[in-house]
Amino acid sequence: MDIPKGATVAVADGERLNLFRNSGDEASPKLTALAVEDVTNENKGSGARHQSSSANPDSSQIEEDSFAAGTAELLNRQVLGGQIANLIIIAAPRTLGELRKHYHQKLSAVLIGEIPKDLTGHSAQEIEKAVASA
């Protein structure tokens, strides 16, 4: 998958969000880290509070789901505010599933790709390679 010039790449798991912008071009991307606003994590996830089981997530899973919902909210705001014109999301598979539940219609319109991998903590070069091979 190519990363268009100026595209934003969001890399998330249930606890962290890293944002990058492609300051290079499609042929030779160069991801530059962006400052990330605090993600609001106020129990917005789709999980409910019940006794933990496979059907009922425990409190740490609820917190991760809430973080994913807050991440989607932050990305939605940036898309609606015109700060993101093209977006690639790379997230741990479960986090990606939770993010999708909260996408605004306009975010879906600028979304050019999703990669279900946990690449938080990886370098920009490793993320560039993962996107190129997707």
Image (tube, rainbow, N blue to C red):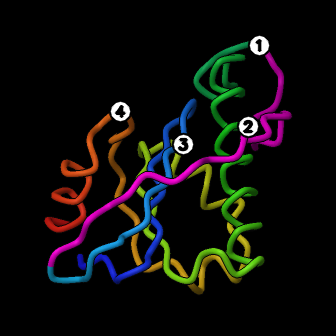
Identity of the residue drawn at 71% across and 28% down: 62
Label 1 crowd (10 A; few <14 / some 14-19 / many >=20): few
Q: Image height check: is 36 above or below 49?
A: below
Q: Cα distance, mark 3 to mark 4? A: 10 Å
Q: Nearer the viewer, residue 98 or 127?
A: 127
Q: Nearer the viewer, mark 2 or mark 1?
A: 2
Q: Estimate the spatial distance between the alpha carbons at disc 3 and disc 1, rounded to whole Å.
A: 28 Å
Residue visible at 16% across and 58% down in the picture: 129
Q: Amino acid at mark 4?
A: Gly
Callout 1 amino acid? Gln
Determine whether label 4 and label 1 are within 8 Å by CB: no
Whether pointer 3 and pointer 1 mark residues with C-beta atoms closer than 8 Å, the reply is no
Q: Is residue 27 above or below residue 16?
A: below
* C-alpha distance separating marks 4 and 1: 32 Å
Residue located at (60% from left, 76% from top): 84
Label placed on residue 17: 3
Label 2 or label 4, whichever comes before in sequence order: 2
Which numbered tag is attached to residue 66? 2
Residue 46 belongs to magenta span:
yes
Looking at the rendering, the stretch of residues picked out in magenta corresponds to: 28-50
Secondary structure type for disc 1: loop
State the residue in front, 121 or 52.
121
Q: Which residue is mark 4?
A: 121
Sequence-wise first label, 3 or 4: 3
Q: Which is in the foreground here, disc 4 or disc 1?
A: 4
Indicate which disc, 3 or 2, sits on the residue closer to the N terminus. Answer: 3
Give the image location of residue 125, x and y in percent.
Answer: 20, 51
